[in-house]
Amino acid sequence: MILSLDVGNTQIYGGVFDKDKMLLSFRRNSRHGSSSDEVGVFLRMVLRENGIDPKGISQIVLCSVVPDVIFSLKGACQKYFNLTPFILQAGVKTGLRIKYRNPLEVGADRIANSIAATNLYPDRHLILVDLGTATTFCAVTKQHDYLGGSIISGLKLSMESLEAKTAKLPSIEIVARNEVLGLSTIESLQSGLYYGHLGAMREIITRMTNECFQGEKPFVIGTGGFSSLFEKEKIFDAIIPDLVLKGNLIALQMNQNYSKNQSAAGVEK
């Protein structure tokens, strides 16, 4: 079995795979300053509580946009699983041609999403929308050129900003609204967050389609924790919440020279 981990700014999203089948998924706050022992104990506990023997994990793969967490997570994998994780980072094989001015600036989660999407839909132009702490948009051609993208504030971050910077606006539950008109402060906030985000996504997808693919319709994939919230709006051709974890697995398979006793720096470039 393979343990796949995505370290985001807010959460660690993890999954256990037996070949291509996901057996378990889980989330944990990615608190800065967590020790390797805290992370390692959590990982073993969440596996055991879901009926998976930690000894059955043969490989661990991770991507991270939080550099400070990598050291603790790597130590946790070595101490509690006796495995050195494969880290999706600059220099490993991805099957993509990165067109960013500085390829090192592209988040590892965006690369993982793109790897998975190009393998699932190899002959399609793609727009990937990842709704997490930030909402990111990535454009990838059918030739597997990663063209670039856009980033806006995520739903939860927008809500927390409103709560922190205003005197009377409360924290709210983020939900899909059927009406744009709110009849209370809470409903008005929920409506504004939902339809404001929906409008931003539609506009960016439309403009990205015209700029990147000359109007040829791309296949639009929604992923991330809030992607299912917009399912009824039909702006996504597919919603794949675990896209990043699948991308990690494919990256691991692409880098066959990796072994469980080998550091990521030893992967063939």
Image (cartoon, rainbow, N blue to C red):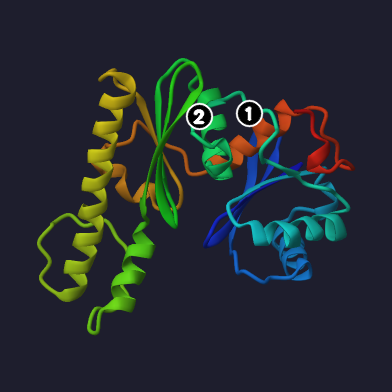
Quadrant including the C terminus: top right
Q: Is residue 196 left or right of residue 34?
A: left
Residue name at image x 24 percent, y 32 percent: 206
Residue name at image x 22 percent, y 83 percent: 168
Above or below for 155 versus 166:
above
Give the mark nearest the N terminus, 2 or 1. Answer: 1
Please state the horizontal and vertical placement of residue 217, each as a whole percent of the image. 29, 21
Q: How many marks?
A: 2
Query: Badge 1 is on which residue?
Result: 94
Residue in the foreground of this view, choosing between 56 and 148: 148
Which element type, helix, strand or loop, lies under badge 2?
Answer: helix
Quadrant including the N terminus: top right
Q: Is residue 4 left or right of residue 243?
A: right
Query: Badge 2 is on which residue?
Result: 117
Q: Is residue 191 left or right of residue 139?
A: left
Q: CA distance from mark 2 to mark 1?
A: 12 Å
Residue type pointed to by label 1: Thr
Residue 48 visible in this rendered orientation of the protein = no
Q: Are marks 2 and 1 in contact (CB under 8 Å)?
A: no
Residue name at image x 60 percent, y 42 percent: 245
Q: Say which quarter of the image contains residue 259.
A: top right
Residue type pointed to by label 2: Ala
Q: Say which quarter of the image contains residue 94.
A: top right
